Image (spheres, rainbow, N blue to C red):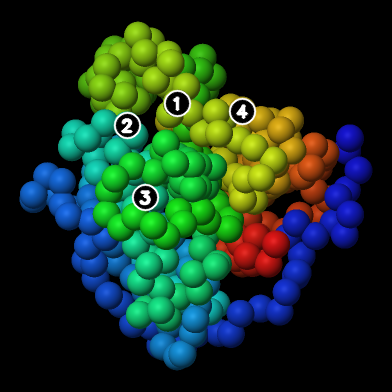
């Protein structure tokens, strides 16, 4: 069906805006688990909290690096510059790199960070019932995997604090990968050759030394069952938290088709999502602060087994992201 959802409210104002923050306190290099390896930084987070009594809803950010870095928390300052003034706390979370540990270590790490933040919510003036997670590229994959597997016992791992829930109330995926085995087939013309030259590979994402193969601990073509377990689509369900997906059609590193696969699975299985498809945008999200970069975007919605175009959707700015998260928090 293509009718607008009742109330047509995916990005409308469902609840009053949160109180605006003024000054922000930063708590750096907080350990949510012991380091692995001992000199690693993959179990650290930075926390930005507006001054005041709170409790504040929390946005968790992790940056992408093709899973090659354990410094994913470093990108959170840009998100914090907006969200703390909008009345949110922001946590920048690092997870282990693929060189330090293979899948599912990264999923275990982000879920451990969620549990730690929930366990320590009172001490940092966080609202433990209103957590959102977001990231870009491989960080978008981490965020989406966390959102779709909250409280699944066999996927919790044994990292850090156990007991508190790892479930989040909303998630935002900036151009994250999904099905590693379909990436090469949908690369834009010439992009595979550029990708090879950039990373010193010969066979694109299917190469034995591609970022995806290194994450999986071997050539992805030789472990399709394990790749399925690393695919967010595997875990899509009607009960998932609302997911906002944003992807540029000109992305030459992670083809937009990866997000199409995710959105179509959510629509088919009764989940809730909004998908922004943005022409002439590559592997970036500069449009969140410069909406002119996202001209001619198309937004689609899915909810309860229905889907359609989202008429009069606002530009994909930080303000729009915040409104989506607020709707998720209010569900």
Task: Estimate how packed mark 4 is, as few (under 14), some (14 to 19) or many (20 or more) residues with alpha carbons within 10 Å.
Answer: some
In contact (CB < 8 Å): disc 1 and disc 2: yes
Separation of residues labelled 1 and 4 (CA atoms) = 15 Å
| Helix, strand or loop status at disc 2 | loop
* Mark 3 vs 4, N-terminal side: 3
Q: Nearer the viewer, mark 1 or mark 4?
A: 1
Q: Is residue 73 above or below residue 13?
A: above
86 vs 204, nearest the viewer: 86
Give residue 229's mark: 1
Separation of residues labelled 3 and 2 (CA atoms) = 12 Å
Separation of residues labelled 3 and 4 (CA atoms) = 23 Å
Q: Position of residue 45 (x, y in %)?
A: 28, 62
Task: Estimate how packed mark 2 is, as few (under 14), some (14 to 19) or many (20 or more) residues with alpha carbons within 10 Å.
Answer: many
Which residue: 17% across, 55% down?
34
Hey, which residue is sitting farthest left in the picture? 39
In contact (CB < 8 Å): disc 3 and disc 2: no
Give residue 110's mark: 3
In contact (CB < 8 Å): disc 3 and disc 4: no
Which residue: 64% across, 37% down?
237
184 vs 326, nearest the viewer: 326
In contact (CB < 8 Å): disc 1 and disc 4: no
Q: Is residue 79 above or below residue 202?
A: below
Give residue 103's mark: 2
Q: How many numbered badges does the structure rendering display? A: 4
Q: Position of residue 315 (x, y in %)?
A: 67, 57
* Mark 3 vs 2, N-terminal side: 2
* Mark 2 vs 4, N-terminal side: 2
Q: Position of residue 252 (x, y in %)?
A: 46, 30
Q: Nearer the viewer, mark 3 or mark 4?
A: 3
| Helix, strand or loop status at disc 3 | helix
* Mark 3 vs 1, N-terminal side: 3
């Amino acid at each position: 069906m293509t009718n607008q959802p009742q109330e047509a409210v995916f990005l409308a104002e469902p609840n009053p805006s949160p109180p605006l923050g003024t000054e922000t306190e930063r708590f750096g290099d907080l350990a949510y688990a012991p380091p692995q390896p001992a000199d690693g930084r993959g179990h650290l987070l930075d926390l930005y909290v507006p001054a005041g009594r709170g409790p504040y809803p929390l946005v968790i950010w992790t940056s992408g690096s093709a899973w090659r870095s354990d410094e994913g928390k470093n990108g959170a300052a840009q998100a914090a510059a907006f969200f703390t003034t909008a009345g949110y706390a922001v946590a920048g979370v690092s997870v282990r790199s693929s060189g330090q540990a293979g899948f599912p270590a990264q999923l275990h790490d982000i879920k451990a960070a969620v549990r730690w933040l929930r366990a320590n919510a009172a001490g940092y003036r966080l609202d433990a019932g209103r957590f959102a997670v977001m990231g870009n590229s491989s960080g978008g994959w981490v965020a989406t995997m966390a959102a779709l597997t909250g409280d699944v016992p066999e996927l919790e791992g044994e990292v850090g604090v156990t007991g508190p829930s790892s479930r989040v109330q909303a998630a935002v995926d900036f151009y994250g990968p999904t099905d590693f085995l379909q990436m090469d087939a949908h690369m834009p013309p010439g992009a595979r050759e550029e990708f090879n030259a950039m990373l010193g590979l010969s066979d694109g994402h299917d190469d034995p030394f591609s970022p995806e193969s290194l994450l999986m601990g071997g050539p992805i073509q030789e472990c399709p069952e394990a790749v399925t377990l690393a695919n967010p689509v595997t875990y899509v369900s009607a009960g998932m938290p609302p997911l906002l997906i944003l992807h540029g059609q000109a992305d030459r590193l992670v083809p937009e088709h990866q997000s199409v696969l995710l959105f179509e699975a959510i629509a088919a299985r009764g989940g809730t999502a909004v998908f922004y498809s943005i022409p002439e945008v590559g592997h970036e999200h500069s449009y969140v602060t410069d909406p002119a970069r996202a001209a001619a975007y198309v937004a689609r919605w899915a909810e309860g087994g229905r889907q359609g175009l989202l008429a009069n959707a606002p530009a994909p700015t930080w303000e729009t992201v915040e409104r989506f998260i607020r709707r998720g928090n209010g569900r």
